[in-house]
Image (cartoon, rainbow, N blue to C red):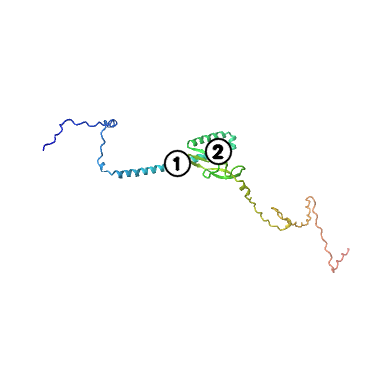
């Protein structure tokens, strides 16, 4: 049995050239070295561990964002209270007389401009139906031709912050005419007044007349002594003769 003829030895066939982009990336770079022990690593366990760490970091970042937003909301609420104070000061007659009203109004406009850049804008609710999520009703008023619970006046301005309600508005709304007419008026009960004489009893706070007491006769008063007059000596009262007593004999004349 003869062996099969072998092909003559010659130069090896050239390998296929690499793609252009891949060759450009590998040109001048050495292949990455595999660290020792990398082949024995459990890739599934390591990937689960990375997912757990990523979840913890995400929760921590969410808490930080919520805390920062709460602090920002509190700061914006304080600035709104400052706007309320400026509005009240602008209505002070003494400050207006001193020429401070224009300065207060300019400061207020600047503050509202800063709030608008932060996404805060005031509510415009006049003529709209009162929404419990946006308004707080502090009063009612009967207005003919206006639907009930329509905002008539804004007492305290409300504000939006982006898509949230930063502060609800305090408003006065229209009341139904039938409800206002049918509501009985509360009449205070009269307070009973004790009456002694029925002829003197009257409705009100008058007291019964008391019978007049008899007046005592005036006693004559002694006239005051005149200091310039001479004192008059008191008269000597003569004693009457006692009955049955003999009279004294007259003295004999010498």
- State the residue in front, 129 or 226: 129
Relative to the observer, which residue lies in front, 107 or 45?
Answer: 45
Q: SS of the residue at dot 1? A: helix
Q: Secondary structure at mark 2?
A: helix
In percent of width and height, residue 162 lies at: 48, 39
Which of 20/112 is in front? 20
Q: Quadrant of the N terminus?
A: top left
Residues marked 1 and 2 touching at CB (< 8 Å): no
Q: Is residue 44 visible?
A: yes
Residue lying farthest right?
253
Q: Which mark is drawn over residue 69?
A: 1
At horizontal 45% and vertical 41% (from top left) the residue drawn is: 69
Left or right: residue 45 versus residue 157 is: left
Mark 1 residue crowding within 10 angstroms, few (<14) / some (14–19) / many (20+): few
Q: Which residue is mark 2?
A: 87
Does residue 100 appear in this view?
no
Asked where in the image residue 59 lies, by quadrant, the reply is top left
Whole-number angstrom distance, CA of label 1 to CA of label 2: 27 Å
Question: Tag 2 or tag 1, which sits nearer the N-term?
Answer: 1
């Amino acid at each position: 049995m003869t062996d099969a003829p072998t092909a003559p030895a010659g130069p090896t066939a050239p390998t296929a050239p690499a793609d252009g982009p891949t060759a450009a990336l590998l040109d001048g770079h050495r292949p990455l070295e595999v660290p020792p022990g990398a082949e024995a690593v459990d890739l599934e366990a390591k990937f689960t561990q990375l997912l757990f760490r990523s979840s913890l970091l995400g929760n921590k970042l969410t808490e930080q964002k919520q805390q920062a937003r709460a602090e920002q909301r509190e700061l914006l609420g304080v600035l709104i209270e400052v706007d309320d104070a400026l509005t009240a000061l602008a209505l002070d007659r003494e400050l207006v007389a001193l020429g401070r009203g224009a300065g207060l109004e300019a400061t207020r406009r600047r503050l509202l401009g800063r709030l608008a850049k932060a996404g805060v804008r005031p509510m415009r609710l006049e003529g709209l139906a009162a929404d419990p999520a946006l308004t707080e009703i502090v009063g009612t008023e009967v207005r003919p031709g206006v639907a009930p619970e329509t905002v008539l006046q804004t007492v305290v301005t409300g504000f939006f912050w982006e898509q949230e309600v930063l502060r609800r508005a305090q408003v006065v709304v229209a009341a139904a005419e039938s409800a206002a007419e049918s509501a009985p008026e509360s009449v205070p009960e009269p307070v009973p007044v004790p009456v002694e004489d029925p002829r003197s009893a009257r409705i009100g706070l008058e007291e019964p007349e008391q019978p007049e007491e008899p007046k005592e006769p005036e006693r004559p008063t002694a006239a005051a002594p005149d200091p310039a007059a001479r004192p008059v000596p008191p008269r000597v009262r003569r004693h009457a003769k006692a009955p049955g007593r003999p009279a004294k004999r007259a003295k004999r004349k010498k």
